[in-house]
Amino acid sequence: MLPNREGKRIPTVTFRTRQNNEWVDVTTEELFAGKTVVVFSLPGAFTPTCSSTHLPGYNELAKVFKENGVNEIVCISVNDTFVMNEWAKDQEAENVVLIPDGNGEFTDGMGMLVDKQDLGFGKRSWRYSMLVKDGTIEKMFIEPEEPGDPFKVSDAETMLAYINAQAQKPKLVSLFAKIGCPFCAKAKAMLKDHGMDYEEIVLGRDVTSRSLRAVTGAATVPQVFIDGKLVGGSEELATFLGVG
């Protein structure tokens, strides 16, 4: 049975990281001392659930976590620093600190090192998350010991609900735009002024005109979606945001 270490100190480990083409040692003291830190650990960078849901979830909710007293969000995986750095770039995970536990020392100290030889992975981390305050573990969410790779309790929303069940999650905003479009620039400025992060989908690069019409029913940009609903162009966005 995987151990729940609530109330205990985290293992003392030095992580070997690569920053700006130089080796930099990062200690658990630097990561956790005097801070409130959310940690989530997973089987491996670039793997399906880790890339599609686990890491993106924490990255997207990072601002809300910080508004609720969290100083840092840390992802730890039994991978080397080169893999973790490339994964961070691929995921555009600028709100999460990705830490390589290459030798599995931290994971082993947590009692979370498991054998995944059947997948050709060797020793990896079981999936879990935890809230750490000044180096002491306050809360752990450990995935159930079931076959495969369960992902039921270590997600960002579960952790956020523990910290503050009333926390307001950010709206999900997608913006269809075109390079050089002044109305698109106006829409992006309005979203920025209202503190709303958005995903930009560029016409001619990420999507075709045909796809734009199929999805939005319109042939012009910008077209803004908020929480899955089409708001429309810059004028409709201004009305939605109450901009005079």
Image (cartoon, grey):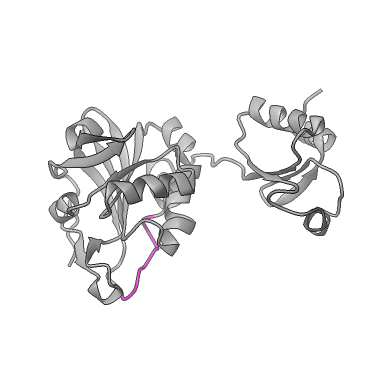
What is the quadrant of residue 243 in the picture?
top right
Indicate the position of residue 27 as horizontal and vertical percent values. 18, 35
Q: Is residue 152 magenta?
A: yes
Which span is picked out in magenta?
146-154
Q: Residue furthest top?
A: 244
Q: Quadrant of the C terminus?
A: top right
Indicate the position of residue 194 as horizontal and vertical percent values. 65, 28
Residue under the point 31% across and 61% down: 43
**Image height of 210 relative to 182, above or below:** below
Q: Quadrant of the N terminus?
A: bottom left
Q: Main secondary structure of the magenta part?
A: loop
Instruction: Count the numbered circles shown.
Output: 0
Indicate the position of residue 60 as horizontal and vertical percent values. 50, 43
Indicate the position of residue 165 as horizontal and vertical percent values. 45, 44
Residue under the point 17% across and 53% down: 103
Q: Is residue 166 magenta?
A: no
What is the quadrant of residue 144 in the picture?
bottom left
Lateral position of residue 242 relative to residue 134, left or right: right
Residue under the point 45% across and 31% down: 67
Lateral position of residue 74 relative to residue 95, left or right: left
Q: Nearer the viewer, residue 24 or 219?
A: 24
**Image height of 196 relative to 175, above or below:** above
Q: Residue furthest front?
A: 21
